[in-house]
Amino acid sequence: MNNTAQPGMQQNPDFSVDEREAVYRAIFTRRDVRGEFLPDPVPDEVLARVLTAAHHAPSVGFMQPWDFLVIRSPAVKARVQALYRQANEEAAQMFEGEKQSTYRRLKLEGIVEAPVNLCITCDRKRNGPVVVGRTHIKTMDIFSVVCAVQNLWLAARAEGLGVGWVSIFHPVVVKEYVASEVI
Ligand SMILES: Cc1cc2nc3c(=O)[nH]c(=O)nc-3n(C[C@H](O)[C@H](O)[C@H](O)COP(=O)(O)O)c2cc1C
């Protein structure tokens, strides 16, 4: 364990220098991964660790409005990818000319290749209509979910797991599909 502080670094008895460096390394080397997913299954214990990291995120009024739906079914992934493709076609048409051609060349998802998909939800009614800290800016619940995703993303980096975020969907359509699969 390296406890030698570098110039400009304050001593922190809770973190050795190596531990601190590891945190920064995870932050600086985290990337959005859309391609090159390996087909290897993600061990349950690794998935549990990154999900636990997500659950330790801060949330407004301790609302914890998130749920993480773990999707491994190839059929469900294929359907979700079809929903992505639909939305992505609409997205492409929002750009004109050369920009549209460039957009169409981008790889913006790895839904089917990734061994695990996580559908991350935000229950906007959790803990009732009035939540401490969310009285005036209602989107604070969504901000909280984003904090959870970032925790998961950094933990995944430390675990050597690639993570890619896909947001090109009609949320209502995805919600209806997921509800029909889960219930
Ligand atoms: C809220 C959010 C939504 C995103 N949605 C997508 C997406 O739909 N498709 C995609 O390929 N990347 C998506 N990304 C990843 C960003 O494109 C990526 O984080 C950004 O280009 C910076 O690259 P880096 O994460 O590798 O540093 C999203 C990221 C965030 C934070």
Image (cartoon, rainbow, N blue to C red):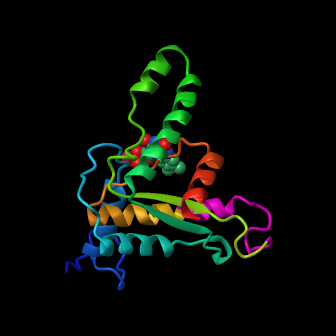
x, y (%) of residue 90? 58, 29
Is 60 one of the magenta-colored residues?
no
Q: Is residue 69 visible?
A: yes
Identify the residue at horizontal 36%, vertical 84% (top origin): 14
Q: Residue at x 45, y 66 (%)?
A: 151
Which region of the structure is painted magenta? 129-146
Q: Quadrant location of the N terminus?
A: bottom left
Q: Quadrant of residue 126?
A: bottom right
Any part of residue 164 in sight: no
Instruction: Name the quadrant of the C terminus.
Output: bottom right
Locate residue 70 relative to residue 181 in the image: left or right: left
Is 59 or 73 nearer to us in this picture? 73
Identity of the residue drawn at 25% across and 73% down? 18
Residue 155: x and y in percent read 36, 67
The quadrant holding residue 158 is: bottom left
In this orientation, which residue lies closer to the viewer: 102 or 170?
Answer: 170
Given the current orientation, which residue lies at the most extreme top position?
Answer: 97
State the image quarter where residue 25 is shown: bottom left
| Image side of residue 45 versus residue 180, left or right | left
Q: Position of residue 135 (x, y in %)?
A: 79, 68
Q: Main secondary structure of the magenta part?
A: loop
Dividing the image into four equal quarters, which quarter contains ligand 1? top left
Q: Position of residue 10 (x, y in %)?
A: 37, 75
Camera-side residue: 179 or 11? 179
